[in-house]
Amino acid sequence: MRIAIPLTGTRGDVHPVVGLAVELRRRGHEVLLGAPPNLVDFVTAAGLPAQACGPDVQQLYSSEEGQRALAAGNTLRLMQMVGKQMAEYGERMNHEVIDVCSKAELIVASTVTEDRASSVAEAMGVPLVSLHYFPCRMNSAYPFPGLLPAHWNPPGPVNRATWAVAENLRRVVFLRYLNQLRGTLGLPKSYTGPAAALARARVPEIQIYDPALVPGLPGQWDERRPFTGFLTLDRATRTAVGELSGSHDDLLAWIGSGAPPVFFGFGSMPIRDAAAVFAMVEQVSARLGVRALVHAGWSDLDVANTVTGDRIKLVSANFAYDLVFPLCAAAVHHGGIGTLFESLRAGLPTVVCSVSFEQPMWGGQVEKLGVGAHLPFTAMTAELLERKLAPLLNDESRTRVRDFAATLLTTGTAERAADLIEAAAR
């Protein structure tokens, strides 16, 4: 079967789907991934055919406008910014999605490409499956991510109202380019949002995050929204994309030379003043008497020329979380679902310093589940970070997180997702 997977977003959006695509190819399917131009090489390194699809979101986030929006930590403002970029890039992306899907017998979309993919699938008369990285459909258990303070526990009607507002905003912001696409495809205009369109077509929406993170939600959804757990890469693919490189020797030697360090990293979120954040990490680690492993991520921190003491290890290259995290004492990061899964799977008490989108929700969840703490990045100071991290650096916290880790789905996740996709094709 020929399967097209149009994607856009950051590496966190592409990484888990590569694991799924590798499993589908292993089963004999022809798979083509559409990926942002800055991530095409990452996909092809995994041995998968890929072509450019969508804008370079890293470039958008790193722009002056993107940095201001991230610094504000406002989800609605970020949605409007992304909507503006999509409007400017819209016609080109329409054609890129059409091109990626042109020979497909089944289309697999993501949260941010399902609207376009649903129209393409409709025009081609082929099945569609959507992958969701976080709860992104109306429910009464949780509000729309980022719309309300993460520590709130609103009643069901309030939660549902936030979804109505957010879904209508998404419909309004993206309807223009969607109807341009539908016109190109010879389809009538649509006035409904993606959620309503996919519900009407009974499109399967696979939840590629762990149900243990969202208690109360699985029971509200039917078989159209199954949970698989986070999709991971097999060892051969991880080696191919550089996650198991020899650079681990130096890193593992440093970790083994002293007490387990605390991991600090902010993944694909560009940091506006990385030097100031690094100074904050230095200050907190000194006050708490812990060593710090700092991952520079997309920040502009000059790793080669940044002076660190013996208690701090600064790295820029990607590394294998499953090799490094079990040797750490705790983790502090932005709350991207991939990094969150890896830190909790390793049994690490976790401080989520959320930036925007679904990250505040995950921060609220680790706090409510008793496995960590939440601190919005916009509010982060050395004093607050120390206050959030200090209570997690004890055996009781680590035992609690290890017990929670035992409930996570850690094996066979890509296989389960592939089974569901094959069932949709049938």
Image (cartoon, rainbow, N blue to C red):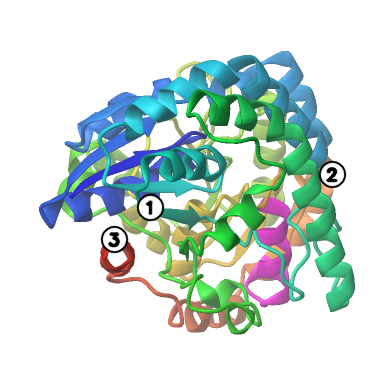
N-term-proximal mark, 1 vs 3 = 1
Q: Along the line of sight, which residue is nearer the eye, 212 or 319? A: 212
Q: Is residue 218 a member of the stretch shown in magenta?
A: no
SS label for mark 2: helix
Secondary structure at numbered mark 3: helix
Query: Horizontal placement of 378 versus 305: left or right?
Result: right
> Is 361 colored magenta in this rendering?
yes
**Distance from label 1 to label 3 (Cα)?**
34 Å
Can residue 323 be seen here? The reply is yes
Q: Is residue 161 left or right of residue 185?
A: right
Left or right: residue 161 versus residue 301 is right
Q: Is residue 152 placed above or below 304 in the rendered structure?
A: below
- Picture disc at residue 425: 3
- Please count the marks in the image: 3
- Residue at 21% in and 55% down: 23
Q: Which amino acid does label 2 sit on?
A: Ala
- Inspect the image, locate mark 3, and give the three-letter code of the amino acid beneath it: Ala
Which secondary structure type mostly characterizes the magenta part of the structure?
A: helix
Q: Residue 321 carries which label?
A: 1
Mark drawn on residue 295: none
Mark 2 burial class by Cα count in 10 Å: few <14, some 14-19, many 20+: few
Q: How far separated are the C-alphas under marks 1 and 2? A: 27 Å
Q: x%, y% of residue 349?
A: 58, 67
Residue 424: x and y in percent read 33, 64
Residue at (58%, 72%) from the top-left corner? 213
Which residue is under mark 2?
379
Span colored in magenta: 359-372
Query: How many angstroms separate mark 2 from mark 3 (CA)?
Result: 47 Å
